[in-house]
Image (cartoon, rainbow, N blue to C red):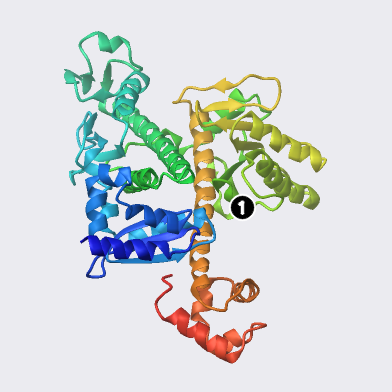
Amino acid sequence: MQNQINEMRKIARGLPSCPGVYLMKDRLGHVIYVGKAKNIKKRVSSYFQGSRRFIRAQPKIAAMVEMVCEIKIHQTQNETEALLLEGKLIKEYKPRYNTDFTDDKQFLQVRVDLQNEMPRFRLCRNKKEDGAHYYGPFAQAGMLRSTLSEMRKKFGILLSDASPVKVGDGRYKLYDDARAEIFAGHNETTVEEYGKRVEEACSFLEGRAKSWLSELRESMLTAAANMDFERAAYLRDMAEAMAKTIGRNRKFTRTWPRAEEDEGPALERIGEVLHLERAPKAIECFDISHVSGTFVVASMVRFQNGKPDKRAYRRFKIRAFEGNDDFRAMQEVVGRRYGRLHEEGTAFPDLVVIDGGIGQVRAALKAFLLINAEPPPIIGLAKREETVVFPDERGELKLEFRDPALRLLQRARDEAHRFANQFNADLRSKKIKESILDDFPGLGKVRRSALLSHFGSLEKMKKASVEDMQKVEGIGEKFAKNLYQFLQSGKIAL
C-alpha cells in the first residue's frame, strides 16, 4: 500500500502547476473522485503527504487516497473554467467520493400536504412520492424553523402543531389558544380562503429557497477562491441537491384559483402606489448576472398588460469593461436599450424596473441622461427586504407581501433574473465545451478563433466535414482530417 502511495506521490510531483481538474481512479479504472484546483500539482500532491493534518483528520479522504491508482488531469484557462468543468465531470462520472457528500436526507425539508383540505407546513428529512409538495433540503435548521414561525404570523398558515376544527358552514377554526391573535388573517376561515394563504406562503417559501440557494453558491465561490476546495465541493453538492428539489416542485400538486389571472387590478394598484399618471401597460425589467465578475451578462424582459411578452425579451453581453461592477453594467445595458429606441423614435415603456437598490437605479437614470432622453418612471426592487426604491428624494416603499402591485413587480423581477441566469449558464456551458479544443495539439488561438467564428459553435463544427473545415483560412487538408477525427472520437460530449 505504501509503495502505491509513493508512486502516486511521484506522479503528483510531475503534474503542471496550473488551474484545472483532476480525476482520481481506482485499480479498475473507475473514477472515484473529481476535484478542481488553482494549482493542480500543489493540490494533488497534498493528498499523498502523510503529514497533512486534513488527511489524518478525515478517515474518508484517507481511505480514498489508499484506493488511488491513476490520476488524470484536465488543464483549464482559469479557476472559473475549472469549477465549471468539475461540475460537468461529477455529473458524468458520479464518483463515489463526491456523491457521498450529497445526501438529501440529512437536511431538513418542508412538506406541505396539499391533498389535505387544510394543508399544514411540516419539517421532514425524507421526500416521499405521496402527492405532497416539498421544499428544500435546507442545511440551516434553525433558520428554517425561524422562517416557518414568521410565515405563520405573516400568512396565517398552519404548522405541524396545529389541529384545525370544523365549526360549521364549511368553515374551520385554526387555533383555540393565544396563537389565534398573533398571525395574519381570521382565525375562522374557509377551505378556499385558506388555500390562497397556502399558495402565497408556498410562493414565499420558494422565493426564500432560491435566495438561500444563491447564498450557497456565493459561499461556494468564496470557498473556492480561498483554496478551501473541500468546503467548496460540500457547498456545491448542497446547492445542487437544493436546486434539484426546487426544480421538481415547480408545479403544484393542488392549485387554487389565482387572483392575478386578471392583471388589471394589479396594474392599477402599481399606478396608484407609484403615483404614475396611468396604469403601466408596458413594463420592462433589467437584471445583471455574473460569476465572480466573469461571464457578465444582462437581461431585459417585457410585461405587456401584466403578462410576459417573450418575443420582446432581450439579452446583453457587457462590452464596455471586464470585471464585477453592477452599476456600470446596468448603465451600459439601459443605455443600449433605450438609446436604440430613442434613435428609432419608438415609445419607451410605461415603467422601468431595475433588479437592485439605489445604486443600480441611479446608474439606469444616468444612462438616460447620457443619451439625452427623458426617462420614463424608474424604480428598483431590492431583494433583501423586497422594497421599492426611487431615483428621487422619495424614501423606500415597503408594500405588504400580499399586495398585488408587489406580486406583479416580483414576477417581472424574477423573470428577468431567470432569463439572465439562463444566458449566463449558456455562455459558461459553451465556454466549457470550447475549452476542450485545447486538448487538440497544434490548435492555437488564431485558428481556434477562426474555426469558431466560421461555424458559430462547437456543435456545428463537430457536424462539419473535412472539406467544410478546409474552407476556413489557415486550415489545411491534413490538419482538417486530424481535427475531424478528434471531434468524432467521442472525447467531446455535446
Quadrant containing the C terminus is bottom left
Of all residues shown, which one is farthest toward the right? 372
In the image, residue 331 lies at what x, y percent? 70, 41
In the image, residue 277 lies at what x, y percent? 69, 28
Q: Nearer the viewer, residue 380 or 38?
A: 38
The answer to which image quadrant residue 184 occupies is top left
The three-letter code of the residue at mark 1 reads Arg
Q: Nearer the viewer, residue 101 or 298?
A: 101
Q: Is residue 312 above or below residue 451?
A: above
For image coordinates 35% across by 30% down, the residue present is: 201
For image coordinates 49% across by 45% down, the residue present is: 225
Q: State left or right for residue 237 relative to residue 80.
A: left
Residue 249 showing in the rendered view: no
Q: State left or right for residue 491 relative to residue 122.
A: right
Quadrant containing the N terminus is bottom left
Q: Is residue 428 above or below residue 348?
A: below
Q: State left or right for residue 108 relative to residue 392.
A: left
Residue 452 showing in the rendered view: yes
Q: Nearer the viewer, residue 185 or 325?
A: 325
The answer to which image quadrant residue 206 occupies is top left
Q: Secondary structure at mark 1?
A: strand
Q: Is residue 465 above or below residue 132?
A: below
In the image, residue 457 lies at what x, y percent? 55, 71
In the image, residue 243 lies at what x, y percent? 36, 46
Q: State the residue position of label 1.
A: 314
Q: State left or right for residue 463 relative to residue 71.
A: right
